[in-house]
Image (cartoon, helix red, strand yellow):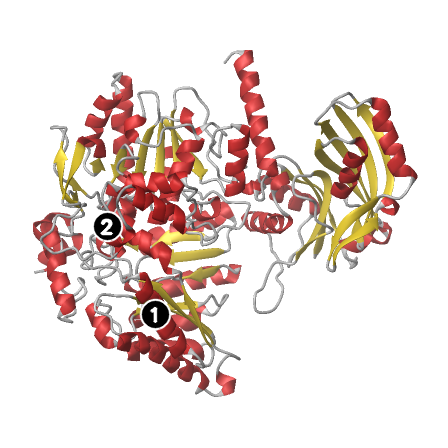
């Protein structure tokens, strides 16, 4: 059976890379003694895949994976058994039996919402900050993006759906950002922050939390 | 704790976390791994178990896993871990002025009572200096006061502790499982009684297996080490290596800490036995872990069950110095494979010797993943293998690789050494000849019976003479000679189908030779090299030859005078005060036999008397044989 699960990734595991998260879950499934299905071939591995990766250092309230099991397990039991053995900072928040639903999770992704807490290296005025935001939203955002063919200037503005100021003080700000996130790629947040730093003329450290990934579940519900 | 202290402690933690956020691999420092030990309380002794290399290497070390468990099983002690910070973290610590911190609580290292280093490899010594300096602790023991942590060290390099004797306060010689408990008991007592550092060290020096170098002063004559003079009457004349008598009952690793990142040996490691009965003459481990002591199969399977459950690992390594010599090996292999294969757990047996390898076991092992096969003939000709007492012949090797090829393996690693005492060009060419025969063995099989293509890797390391081996008096060959012999071998291996050649750069082996057999003067050399930027010397990309050359020159010493020197049999050895149980007399006898090309039998067959008089009191195998008589 195919189990689809949503999970959170918080402190301290926000530092764990995507590849290491795969191993973390595989080991947790083994500790939970779940009936894992394996791939065929020379080096069999559990059939576990994630909707997408998240940058090292970002926390998240809603990531997704699916895993194949050889025997039916109820979503409630799955959640309970895995949560009992997961390390601090990772929790399954919900699980569902995918039934006949075959589409890969990656193809269901639409967009993602983030909360970013910025701490400025030097004090910033609210007006100046507001202006920087409007200026980014008002035109193209050309950034240097690393591609296979080298570094290329790319406009990331089309991938930025919205960006709103939620809180502000001279030394810090909180932004609510919504960006594209699909199988083709997503809003490169670090490059967006780079562009914002350039507009502001000061750098800032940031704590980024992905609140949710919007998924198109309509076919699953049918 | 008052509010102000609490808040400043918290901001420190935040500052440390901010640094962790900035490095390339944060999981090296973040902690919080599954099964990490957590303890709270004010009265605990704080022990920082340090490994002078990166997290991924240190976390793979079985001895540290054991000591972590043993110390944390004590109610009075909290043992935390710390690894050498990678260069990015070192730079951040220096820039921010923060002190090096433990993984568990992020406490600064200088706030610990005891800092313990595992000494596995001489080329990690400079990392000890990095770790001390980043903790704000003076490098030399003579510069440290009553308030500094006690700096202790254990591990195989303690065989010759002299090159770092000026850095370390207390050495543990031999198996650590019991001596760390004795150490903590005496340390706790001394603290309770309000003893000062000197009094504490005197009490500690009375524990068997403990060496306090400050109580001995070296003397030199004509530029050479002459003798060690005892300066504290209460200290022992010689330090006898500690051994755990009953390994089966000894404490083991407990529930393994499960790292987030991929580490070098990312698996459950079960030690079948300690010690080796073979007596290969170049091999320090073969002498300094004697006598042989086994764990029972049932004990091992119980550990294995428990650890699989508590970690979720899918790989188990059943290791020892020569796993094929394990008494129950042919019951063990099928039992383990039957038990775990269905759960897709792969089982490996590193250090299986060619001559003890059975075809049936091989066929069973391919049930799971085919991990590579590794063989260590060590030398290319029978003459040379007799000199080094490697009781393996060509027929054994070829038969075994044939069995392996038939069972579907196509990757084979062959390990050799160059620069062994008495080696000739003929012996070097013999390595290529052996590789050619292995290649022929593979390609002479029908295509449908074998894998697609052979991957045979020939590795040649450079011989390093080590204390407590029959070759401890022998020199290492010079750099030019190493390079010439490597070139000769590379040329000879050219064109052999499916064979690849690997050899390690020789400069680090030279320094390793110095630190293996050196004396106390080398501590200043090491500090000098460190000040000139030497770090992670075992990593080729970090090795700074000039730093070392200048540091040797500054002390009026040279690499050659340590690495390339023939020590005559009647000369004083810098490690003569260390009693490794294997006697110097026995080693001399073995030295003589080597050059006569006489092999010495495995001590399972016959007692060769390596412990001298202590055979009757310290060797279970000897006792069992006597009782059987």
A163 up-or-down from B192: above or below: below
- Residue A64 lies, in percent from the top left, at 72, 47
Dividing the picture into quadrants, the one containing residue B180 is top left
Residue shown at 60%/32% (left/top)? Answer: B18
- Residue B600 lies, in percent from the top left, at 15, 66
Query: Which of B469/B542 is in front?
Result: B542
Question: Which label number is shown at residue B566?
Answer: none
B213 up-or-down from B575: above or below: above
Question: Which label number is shown at residue B484?
Answer: 1
User: Which numbered disc, 2 or 1, marks the residue closer to the eye?
Assistant: 1
Residue B330: in sight, yes or no?
no
Dividing the picture into quadrants, the one containing residue B320 is bottom left
The reply to the same-chain question for discs 2 and 1 is: yes
Chain assignment, label 1: B
- N-terminal-most mark, 2 or 1: 1
Residue B122: in sight, yes or no?
yes
B287 up-or-down from B429: above or below: above
Query: Which of A98/B555 is in front?
Result: B555
Question: Is B301 situated left or right of A180 in this image?
Answer: left
> In the rendered structure, are the residues bearing label 2 and label 1 in contact, judged by CB atoms less than 8 Å apart?
no
Report the quarter where the C terminus of chain B lies.
bottom left
| Cα distance between the residues tagged 2 and 1 | 25 Å
Residue to which mark 2 is pinned: B517
- Residue B404 lies, in percent from the top left, at 41, 75
Chain assignment, label 2: B
Q: Looking at the image, which residue sits at the far right?
A: A138
Badge 1 local density, few (<14 within 10 Å), some, or many (20+)? few
Residue shown at 36%/60% (left/top)? Answer: B506
- Residue A63 lies, in percent from the top left, at 72, 44
The secondary element bearing badge 1 is classed as helix
Question: Is B16 situated left or right of B308 in this image?
Answer: right
């Amino acid at each position: 059976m195919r189990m689809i699960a949503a999970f959170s990734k918080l402190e301290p595991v926000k530092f764990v890379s995507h590849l290491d998260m795969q191993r973390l879950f595989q080991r947790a499934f083994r500790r939970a003694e779940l009936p894992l299905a394996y791939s065929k071939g020379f080096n069999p591995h559990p059939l576990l895949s994630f909707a997408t990766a998240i940058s090292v250092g970002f926390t998240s309230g809603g990531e997704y994976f699916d895993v194949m099991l050889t025997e039916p397990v109820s979503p409630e039991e799955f959640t309970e058994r895995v949560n009992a053995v997961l390390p601090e900072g990772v929790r399954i928040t919900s699980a569902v039996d995918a039934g006949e639903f075959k589409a890969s999770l990656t193809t269901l992704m639409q967009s993602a919402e983030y909360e970013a807490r910025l701490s400025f290296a030097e004090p910033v005025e609210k007006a100046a900050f507001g202006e920087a935001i409007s200026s980014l939203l008002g035109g193209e955002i050309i950034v240097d993006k690393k591609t296979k063919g080298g570094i290329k200037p790319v406009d990331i503005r089309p991938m930025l759906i919205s960006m709103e100021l939620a809180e502000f003080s001279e030394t810090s700000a909180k932004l609510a950002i919504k960006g594209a996130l699909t199988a083709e790629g997503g809003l490169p947040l670090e490059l967006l922050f780079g562009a914002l730093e350039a507009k502001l003329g000061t750098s800032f450290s940031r704590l980024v939390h992905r609140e949710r990934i919007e998924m198109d579940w309509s076919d699953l519900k049918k | 704790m008052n509010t102000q202290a609490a808040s400043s402690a918290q901001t420190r933690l935040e500052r440390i976390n901010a640094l962790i956020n900035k490095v390339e691999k944060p999981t090296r420092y973040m902690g919080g791994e599954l099964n990490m030990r957590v303890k709270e309380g004010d009265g605990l002794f704080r022990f920082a178990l340090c490994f002078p290399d990166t997290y991924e290497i240190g976390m793979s070390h079985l001895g540290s896993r054991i000591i972590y468990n043993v110390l944390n099983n004590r109610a009075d002690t909290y043992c935390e871990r710390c690894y050498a910070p990678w260069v990015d973290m070192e730079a951040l610590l220096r820039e921010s002025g923060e002190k090096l911190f433990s993984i568990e609580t992020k406490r600064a290292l200088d706030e610990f009572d005891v800092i313990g280093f595992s000494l596995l490899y001489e080329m990690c010594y400079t990392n000890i200096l990095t770790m001390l300096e980043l903790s704000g602790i003076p490098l030399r023991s003579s510069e440290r006061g009553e308030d500094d942590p006690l700096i202790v060290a254990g591990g195989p390099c303690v065989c010759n502790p002299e090159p770092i004797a000026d850095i370390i306060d207390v050495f543990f010689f031999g198996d650590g499982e019991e001596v760390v408990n004795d150490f903590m008991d005496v340390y706790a007592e001394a603290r309770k009684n309000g003893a000062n550092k000197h009094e504490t060290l005197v009490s500690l020096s009375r524990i068997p297996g403990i060496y306090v170098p400050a109580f001995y002063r070296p003397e030199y004559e004509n530029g050479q080490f002459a003798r060690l003079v005892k300066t504290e009457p209460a200290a022992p004349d010689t330090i006898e290596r500690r051994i755990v008598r009953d390994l089966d009952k000894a404490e083991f690793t407990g529930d393994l800490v499960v790292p987030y990142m991929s580490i070098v040996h990312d698996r459950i490691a079960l030690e079948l036995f300690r010690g080796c009965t073979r007596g290969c003459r170049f091999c320090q481990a073969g002498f300094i872990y004697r006598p042989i002591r086994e764990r029972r199969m049932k004990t091992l399977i119980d550990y294995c069950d428990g650890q699989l459950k508590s970690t979720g690992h899918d790989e188990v390594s059943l290791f020892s110095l020569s796993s094929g010599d394990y008494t129950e090996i042919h019951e063990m292999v099928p039992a383990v494979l039957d038990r775990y294969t269905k759960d897709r757990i792969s089982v490996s047996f590193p250090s299986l010797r060619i001559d003890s390898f059975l075809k049936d076991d091989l066929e069973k092992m391919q049930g799971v993943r085919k991990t590579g096969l590794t063989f260590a003939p060590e030398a290319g000709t029978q003459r040379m293998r007799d000199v080094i007492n490697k009781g393996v012949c060509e027929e054994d090797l070829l038969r075994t690789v044939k069995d392996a090829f038939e069972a579907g393996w196509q990757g084979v690693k062959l390990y050799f050494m160059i620069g062994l005492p008495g080696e000739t060009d003929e012996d070097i060419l013999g390595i290529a000849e052996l590789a050619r025969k292995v290649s022929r063995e593979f390609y002479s099989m029908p295509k449908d019976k074998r894998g697609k293509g052979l991957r045979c890797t020939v590795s040649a390391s450079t011989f390093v003479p080590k204390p407590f081996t029959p070759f401890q008096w022998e020199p290492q060959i010079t750099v030019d000679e190493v390079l010439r012999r490597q070139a000769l071998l590379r040329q000879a291996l050219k064109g052999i189908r499916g064979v690849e050649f690997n050899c390690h750069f020789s400069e680090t082996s030279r320094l390793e030779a110095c630190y293996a057999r050196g004396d106390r003067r080398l501590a200043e050399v090491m500090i000098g090299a460190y000040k000139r930027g030497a770090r992670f010397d075992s990593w080729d990309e970090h090795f700074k030859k000039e730093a070392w050359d200048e540091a040797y020159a500054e002390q009026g010493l040279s690499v050659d005078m340590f690495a390339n020197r023939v020590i005559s049999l009647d000369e004083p050895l810098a490690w003569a005060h260390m009693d490794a149980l294997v006697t110097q007399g026995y080693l001399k006898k073995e030295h003589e036999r080597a050059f006569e090309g006489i092999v010495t039998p495995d001590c399972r067959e016959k007692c060769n008397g390596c412990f001298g008089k202590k055979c009757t009191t310290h060797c279970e195998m000897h006792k069992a044989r006597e009782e059987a008589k």
